[in-house]
Image (tube, rainbow, N blue to C red):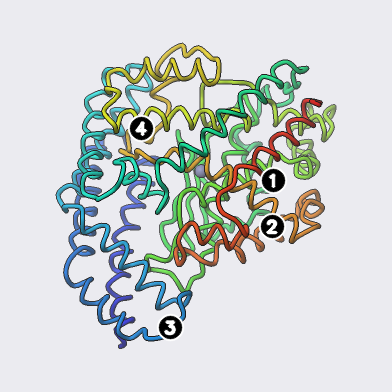
């Protein structure tokens, strides 16, 4: 056994503990009877504590030192050098956090989840306040463990290593400068007819279309699952075990299919990380923004693109002939790209989506900086929705209670959604240069060339590189809002016949 092997064995066990927790979380959101929430919170807390104690212990440090001494001269990108470098960074970071706090964060999040579900159902924000306050307090204690310029930097870093609050603020300022004008121009144009997406669409019929699309994307029946959940998500439980969920609405066709494509984009990233990296900290997507770039690319750039809609019309006509007999590909494409400022982030169109994220970023910053009290969140939320999107929020269920993230204790997560959307446009621009036929393939329902390009340029790195370096290798540049704004203007300009 070499020192690298010893380190790998140690990290393999830790990885197993982490993925056992992922399976418990998946089960909690898909299968678990609701009364088991208390017991599940204890189980997740125990796993988090065991993982934290074992990972941050001196043994990991000793194994790292020995492995590092074996490296001499290994190239930076090699498995061995990357394993030591990335693990050392994770270890240094996690050691700043007391084990008791790590366990309490997991327990409090698992306890808050059913409270949030119930509060959202009854649109009763007050009943969620104690759990939310607890999650926020714990996150602030967590942020205090790190030496950072801004406490919010510590939270961002968990999802997007190295990202800073001013960078997010600068990027988002571009969005608030430019997006409202585009939304207003669309609002003044002739509305898009999306009646073909409304009606009655059986779950079985939707599932048949989704199965066809996902199989083309790369979903394999012996390594993936698709289930239903209130909040669509995807998770990796281990090598060859990718779990996706989607949410069916029998009255609206635009929900389950695009959610499934979105989650499958995440799944493809995890699935595309090479098996040689399995059971190590390198075997996962590098950051949430890069992850979201994959889901958004498949959901919006591909799924809502004109070439794919031309293909999709075939399966839709077969499955729902009475609705789609009289709809052409342009009609379907316009319908799925309808823009309308609305209340719910996960249902938002491409032009307004990022503004929902800007609001959450502003509120999280204010909460973390102590400028906003938890009790005052609904009012701040409703004011922000009016200012950014011009919509009135009728109740907290469709307002401040709509997202699961704060119940999970995840503050600093939201910005990655908008950044991923921006990166998706950068990747698309690069891919079209390198694969001039990509749109012709998509129009034929052939999605493998696209998946393979992503595998080669992004997925295969896993967590070996930093998020910034991963982005540079995939796109040739740093984060850049330009391609995203150009993409939106071109596409929605064509859909709405703007100048
Ligand atoms: Zn996503």
Label 4 near ligand 1 (CB < 8 Å): no
| Viewer-side residue, 392 vs 322 | 392
Q: Is mark 1 within 8 Å of ligand 1?
A: no
Q: Which mark is residue 302?
A: 1
In this rendering, the label closer to the viewer, 4 or 2: 4
Query: Considering depth in this image, is 320 or 41 the residue closer to the camera?
Result: 41
How many angstroms separate mark 1 from mark 3 (CA)? 39 Å
Residue under numbered circle 2: 450
Q: Nearer the viewer, mark 1 or mark 4?
A: 4
User: At numbered mark 2, what does the secondary structure look like: helix, strand or loop?
Assistant: helix
**Other-residue count near label 2 (Cα within 10 Å), few / some / many at <14 / 14–19 / ≥20:** many
Mark found first going from the N terminus, 1 or 4: 1
Tag 1, which secondary structure?
Answer: helix
Point out the image quarter for the C terminus.
Answer: top right
Q: Is residue 345 left or right of residue 336?
A: left
Instruction: Determine whether label 4 and label 3 are within 8 Å by CB.
Output: no
> Which numbered disc flags the more N-terminal residue, 4 or 2?
4
Residue 489 picture location, percent across and down: 72, 34
Q: Residue 80's quadrant in the figure?
A: bottom left
Q: Which residue is mark 4?
A: 365
**Residue mark closest to the camera, 1 vs 3:** 3
Is tag 4's residue or tag 3's residue first in the polypeptide sequence?
3
What's the distance in space between the residues labelled 4 and 2, CA to CA? 37 Å
- The circle drawn on residue 74 is 3
């Amino acid at each position: 056994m070499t020192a690298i092997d010893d380190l790998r064995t140690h990290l393999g066990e830790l990885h197993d503990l982490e993925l056992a927790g992922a399976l418990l979380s998946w089960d909690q959101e898909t299968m678990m009877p609701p009364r088991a929430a208390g017991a599940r919170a204890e189980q997740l807390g125990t796993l988090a504590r065991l993982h934290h104690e074992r990972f941050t212990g001196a043994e990991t440090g000793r194994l790292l030192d020995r492995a590092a001494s074996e490296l001499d001269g290994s190239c930076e990108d090699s498995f061995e050098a990357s394993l030591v470098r990335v693990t050392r960074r994770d270890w240094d970071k996690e050691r700043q956090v007391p084990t008791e706090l790590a366990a309490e964060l997991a327990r409090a999040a698992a306890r808050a989840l059913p409270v949030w579900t119930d509060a959202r159902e009854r649109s009763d924000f007050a009943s969620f306040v104690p759990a939310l306050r607890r999650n926020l307090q714990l996150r602030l204690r967590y942020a205090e463990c790190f030496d950072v310029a801004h406490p919010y930097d510590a939270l961002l870093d968990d999802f997007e290593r190295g990202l800073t609050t001013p960078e997010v603020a600068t990027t988002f300022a571009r969005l608030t400068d430019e997006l409202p004008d585009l939304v207003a121009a669309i609002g003044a144009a002739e509305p898009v007819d999306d009646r073909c997406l409304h009606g009655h669409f059986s779950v079985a019929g939707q599932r048949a279309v989704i199965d066809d699309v996902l199989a083309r994307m790369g979903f394999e029946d012996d390594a993936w699952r698709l289930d239903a959940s209130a909040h669509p998500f995807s998770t990796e439980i281990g090598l060859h075990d990718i779990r996706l969920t989607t949410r069916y609405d029998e009255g609206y066709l635009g929900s389950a299919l695009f959610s499934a494509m979105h989650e499958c984009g995440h799944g493809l990233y995890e699935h595309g990380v090479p098996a040689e990296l399995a059971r190590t900290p390198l075997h996962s997507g590098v950051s949430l923004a890069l992850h979201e770039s994959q889901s958004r690319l498949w959901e919006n750039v591909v799924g809502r693109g004109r070439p794919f809609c031309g293909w999709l019309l075939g399966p839709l006509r077969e499955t729902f002939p009475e609705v789609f007999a009289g709809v052409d590909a342009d009609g379907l494409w316009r319908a799925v790209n309808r823009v309308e400022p609305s209340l719910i982030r996960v249902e938002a169109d491409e032009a307004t989506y990022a503004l929902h994220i800007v609001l959450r970023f502003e509120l999280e910053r204010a909460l973390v900086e102590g400028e906003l009290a938890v009790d005052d969140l609904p009012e701040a939320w409703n004011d922000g929705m009016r200012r950014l999107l011009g919509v009135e929020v009728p109740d907290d269920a469709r307002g401040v209670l709509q997202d699961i993230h704060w119940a999970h204790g995840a503050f600093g997560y939201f910005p990655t959604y908008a950044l991923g959307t921006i990166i998706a446009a950068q990747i698309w621009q690069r891919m079209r240069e390198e694969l001039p036929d990509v749109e012709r393939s998509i129009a034929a329902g052939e999605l493998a060339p696209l998946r393979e390009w992503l595998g080669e340029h992004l997925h295969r790195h896993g967590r070996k590189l930093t998020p910034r370096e991963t982005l540079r290798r995939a796109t040739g540049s740093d984060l850049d809002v330009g391609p995203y704004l150009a993409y939106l203007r071109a596409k929605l300009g064509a859909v709405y016949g703007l100048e």
